[in-house]
Image (tube, rainbow, N blue to C red):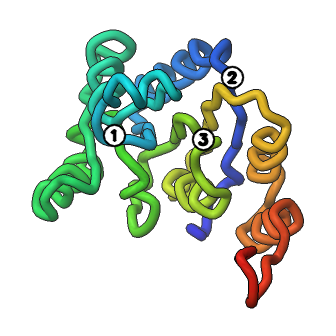
Amino acid sequence: MPLERKKIITEIVQPSGRDKVYEHIRNELKDGRQVYVICPRIDEQDEEERQKRILKSVKEEAERLANIIFPDYVVDILHSKMKKQEKEEVMQDFLDKKSDILVATSVVEVGVNVPNATVIIIEHADRFGLAQLHQLRGRVGRSHYQSHCFLFTESTGESTARRLEALVKAKNGFELAELDMNERGIGTLFDGKQ
């Protein structure tokens, strides 16, 4: 953990709270900070997938944010289907503050250090595992600035609420792993429950 790091404020956000979060982001951007937006998909869904459940994609969300929500800021994208050189250029541009908002898949989960990034939104947070959410949250709070992690979910299930609350309450990865173990069980070696 960076030495001056403050605890990352983590909040679960239902659809009705989206505008309030966007206002918070506007203030951070005005102060010169940067933002990650994590989406579970790269491309838009086909019609069959759409009917099952609408999941935000990097490309669609980046376009929406750039054209409608934050038109005065530079929005870039990053995902695993990009060539290595392309990914490195996008991350360097973000590090050099040439872009303000980086919309990405979980490809930024590890090894990314942008001290100026103070906000991360995780769209459809209920679609990610707790360890992955913990890793993604760690992309912010890399300096002395107060950072925020907003877990956007449309799920109202009790199990989802318990899992996301565990992330909000956990002080570190070990505590989170223990909470996850208690929630899902420890599994077994010789049958199908791993």
Residue position marked by numbered label 3 in the rendering = 125
The amino acid at mark 1 is Leu
Image quarter (top left, top right, bottom left or bottom right) of the C terminus: bottom right
Disc 1, SS: strand
Gap in Å between the C-alphas at discs 1 and 3?
17 Å
Q: Three-letter amino acid code at disc 3?
A: Ala
Q: Which residue, given by chain and number where applicable, does mark 1 sit on?
A: 102
Which residue is at a point 21% across and 54% down the rendered structure image? 81
Figure quadrant of residue 3: bottom right
Q: Are marks 2 and 3 in contact (CB under 8 Å)?
A: no
Q: Is residue 114 above or below residue 98?
A: below
User: Which residue, as the protein is rendered here, is positioned at the far bottom?
Assistant: 190
Q: Residues within 10 Å of mark 3 (few under 14, many from 20)?
A: many
Relative image position of residue 130 (x, y in whole percent): 67, 57
Q: Would you say 145 lies left or right of 101 here?
A: right
Q: Is residue 64 left or right of residue 76?
A: right
Q: Position of residue 109 (x, y in %)?
A: 45, 60
Secondary element at image label 2: loop
Going from N to C along the chain, the mark reached first, 1 or 3, is 1
Rounded to the nearest angstrom, the CA distance separating label 2 from label 3 is 11 Å
- The residue that disc 2 covers is 14
Q: Residue 80 at x, y = what percent?
A: 27, 56
Secondary structure type for disc 3: helix
